[in-house]
């Protein structure tokens, strides 16, 4: 959908034309973190942007799968699930896109092992920021061959890959092309599932496979969207320890998102 900036029309007034009766909506919206902006500032701005778009989806395409690439994903997705819940809709229609973490983990394993990326499938669980990102190298045949002493640094590189890109661009941008690639991968999987060919991708959704209400893990998408949320499976000793760390960070960020949404509805300051 194109909007002529000279027309005077406001984008928010054209959401019906954009969203009406859609099956899948990908929302890569929001502002990037700028110098001097702390995490609460970013959350406040992007939560408001996401809320407007998600409420439009609730109105114009309530049955659609909504894929969110709005940072901070760990906080925004739980808040948007609550928005859907308040509208009487299924919160499992709201999905946080964490595919980029999988793409990065697969690429790094390829660099070490030489195995083709198409043959590497490292599950990445937890969340989509810092220590909440937990790649399970032990569950991929190629990743499992990497010497144990290399895993902690490799794990950390996946966590910090976004910063690595920002530094490589010398402050002139962030991960855009790779995010688009990952978003397209996710979208293709969801659309295949909706068309009757179930596909499995890691995603951040409402979940009961841990003691947290939201968690990223393998998710199978079918004709009605989220069809199955897979258990974590067997973890290595390193992964077990990291899971505790990931859940601690994620728990706080989930709470931050829900508190921010309550403040947004009440008009209070964050």
Image (cartoon, rainbow, N blue to C red):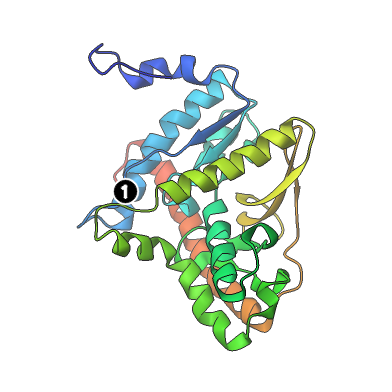
Find numbered disc 1 in the image and state the secondary structure of the residue it sits on. Answer: loop
Residue 173: percent from left, percent from top: 29, 52
Q: Is residue 152 above or below residue 126?
A: below
Give the crowd class for mark 1: few <14, some 14-19, many >=20 residues within 10 Å. some
Residue 10 percent location from the top left of the image? 30, 18
Q: Is residue 237 left or right of residue 160?
A: right
Outermost residue on the left side: it is 36
Query: In percent of the image, x 78 and y 41: which residue is there?
Result: 198
The residue at the point 71 percent across, 68 percent down is 140
Tell which of 185 and 91 is nearer to you: 185
| Percent x, y of residue 169 | 29, 58
Question: Eyeballing the image, is 219 above or below 120?
Answer: above
Extreme residue toward the bottom, this view: 149
Is 159 drawn above or below residue 72 in the view shown? Answer: below
- Numbered label tally: 1
For the N terminus, the image quarter is top left
Residue farthest toward the top in the current orientation of the protein: 7
Q: Nearer the viewer, residue 265 or 236?
A: 236
177 displayed left or right of 110: left
Q: Which residue is mark 1?
A: 32
Location of residue 92 by image quarter: top right
Q: Is residue 144 visible?
A: yes
Residue 78 can be seen in this image = no
Q: Nearer the viewer, residue 82 or 12?
A: 12
Residue 137 percent coordinates (x, y):
65, 72
* Residue in view at x 65 percent, y 78 percent: 240
Which of 137/110 is in front?
110
Name the residue: 66% across, 57% down. Answer: 118
């Amino acid at each position: 959908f194109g909007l002529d900036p000279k027309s005077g029309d406001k984008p928010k007034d054209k959401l019906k034309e954009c969203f009406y009766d859609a099956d899948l909506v990908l929302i890569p919206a929001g502002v990037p973190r700028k110098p001097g902006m702390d995490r609460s500032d970013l959350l406040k701005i992007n939560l408001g942007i996401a809320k407007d778009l998600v409420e439009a989806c609730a109105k114009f395409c309530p049955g659609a799968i909504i894929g969110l690439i709005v940072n901070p994903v760990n906080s925004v997705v739980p808040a948007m699930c609550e928005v859907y819940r308040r509208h009487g809709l299924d919160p499992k229609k709201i999905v946080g896109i964490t595919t980029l973490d999988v793409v990065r983990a697969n690429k790094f394993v390829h660099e070490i092992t030489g195995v083709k990326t198409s043959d590497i499938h490292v599950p990445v669980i937890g969340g989509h920021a810092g220590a909440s990102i937990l790649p399970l190298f032990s569950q991929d045949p190629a990743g499992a061959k990497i010497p144990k002493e290399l895993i902690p640094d490799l794990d950390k590189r996946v966590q910090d890959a976004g910063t690595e890109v920002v530094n490589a661009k010398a402050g002139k941008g962030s991960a855009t092309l790779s995010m688009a690639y990952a978003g397209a991968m996710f979208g293709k999987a969801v659309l295949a599932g909706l068309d009757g060919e179930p596909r499995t991708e890691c995603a951040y959704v409402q979940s009961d496979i841990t003691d947290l209400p939201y968690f990223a893990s393998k998710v199978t998408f079918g004709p009605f969207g989220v069809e199955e949320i897979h258990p974590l499976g067997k973890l290595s000793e390193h992964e077990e320890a990291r899971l505790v760390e990931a859940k601690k960070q994620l728990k706080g960020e989930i709470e931050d998102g829900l508190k921010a949404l309550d403040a947004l509805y009440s008009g209070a300051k964050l």
